[in-house]
Amino acid sequence: MRIDVRFTDRVGIAQEVLATLARRAFNVTAVEVEPPHIYVEAPELDGAGLAGLRDELMRVPSVLSVSPVGILPGAQRRIYLDHLLASQADPVFAIDTEGRVAVANRAAVAASGLAAKAVAGAAIEPLLGQPGLLEGLVAGDYHLPVTEIEFGGEPYMMETTPLHEDGGRLAGAVVTLHAPSRMGEQLSALRNYGSSGGFDAILGVSQEMAQLKLRAARMALVDAPLLISGETGTGKELLAHACHAASPRGSQPFFALNCAALPENLAESELFGYSPGAFTGALRGGKPGLLELADRGTVFLDEVGEMSPYLQAKLLRFLNDGSFRRVGGDRELKVDVRIISATHRALDEMVAAGAFRQDLLFRLNVLNLHMPALRERTDDILPLAHSILARACAQAGRPALRLTPAASAALLTNPWVGNVRQLQNVIFRAVTMCERPLIDVADLELAGSAARPDNEGAVGTLEQAVADFERQLLQRLYREYPSTRRLAKRLGTSHSAIAARLRRYGIGEV
């Protein structure tokens, strides 16, 4: 039986309580003193013996009560600590000031390939294959920068945290090894895409969107590369994430890389990672890339048509066998990642022009989806506008605003060259600037005469009307943003896309 002796603290009371137990010849196997409690474990003590023992203990000065308990607090904490450590998927070692393992969790023992008894008490330096680690810990007060190591044949990012006694004296350190895949799960969880993250997050009531969602739901279940085409601003990344969420990989990481937003060297290190000392300014321990972080998950390559020839070749090699090397590394890494890519460009035309590898296109275009432009699904314009309006009002902390009939009509007739992204910008700007409870046409700040051709009767085709609107819009905005990069940022698209359009319409110097 285990008992709790509650007392008023005074010098010598613990000895008197234990002496009482000794006089009754009980075999005491554990004692924990945590004022105002003394916890005692005596296996031979039963209910009958407790009554007599309680009477005798209550005669000890300052003893307030004697009652049975189910488990000693210290033993309870050890059980919880053991289960807490066992639940950690990353290897964790607690080491003393001499660099020897005091405690190791189940994942650490498994990664070492040794028996638990062999890990306990082992020197951490040879165990991890890190000579000089203890010297570095001492020099850095047992806290070192995160460093990449290889343990048990697997890469890890090693993190150290100092341990202190109650008085502040150093007692050792906790060494945690973070697997890239585990880091990827945590980072991906932070980059959430709304409550559902699936096809319900893609708003649209039109027949075009209904058919797209049906086709996408089928393709989501097929574990093969997927290519999404569509104009800038149509929501290709949202569709890619929905396909990931509905796939067998849905519980695993999802990461996106915009190939048009980064120079070649940065895009390469983001996607493939880099080894220690790969270049000036690199983290000392190296850095895993998105492919490592997304192991068993999905990587979305947006604007894959902007990828350089060198990166195209490196991506093709990865698609062939799932292996790659980090920047500056000489070790082959292999991961299980599904690639979903997207582009607003005609990749087959780029192949014909020698700007994109045909073999890479074959590997990316196993499955394909096309995201329709907003002007091709006019039934979705007002539902999208109302949804964006409600979200904009909530974010701005404003009472719900409404669109006037004239504003709704203007939204329906606008060409929406920038698609859903442009619609979102228009609505958010109107909510920010409008001081009335109703949003009218003027509040939308649409492109004036460019929103409607000067001579509607002369319009031959929708394609020509869109081209006229695009030219007029670019001519007007180029005066305010006289560089391709500034104009691309203003319109929320890539620099190369704006440069191509300016050349097409003979606007400015490109």
Image: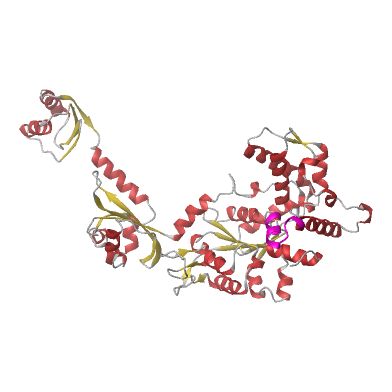
Residue 376 position (above or below residue 53): below
Q: Nearer the viewer, residue 379 or 367?
A: 379
- Residue extending farthest right: 457
When asked about the image quadrant of residue 92, the answer is bottom left
Magenta stretch bounds: 479-490
Residue closer to the observer: 321 or 399: 399
Q: Position of residue 195 (x, y in %)?
A: 58, 44
Tally the marks.
0
Q: Residue at x 28, y 65 (%)?
A: 125
Q: On the picture, is 459 further left or further right than 280? A: right
Q: How is the model colour-coded?
A: secondary structure
- Predominant secondary structure, magenta span: helix
The answer to whether residue 100 is magenta is no
The quadrant the N terminus occupies is top left
Provide residue 403's location: percent of width, then percent of height. 77, 37
Q: Quadrant of the C terminus?
A: bottom right
**Residue 21 in sight here:** yes
Report whether residue 233 is seen. Answer: no
Q: Is residue 481 magenta?
A: yes
Residue 401: where, in percent of width, then height? 72, 35
Residue at 86% in and 60% down: 464
Asked if residue 19 lies left or right of residue 244, the reply is left
User: Residue 250 placed where, x, y %?
Assistant: 55, 54
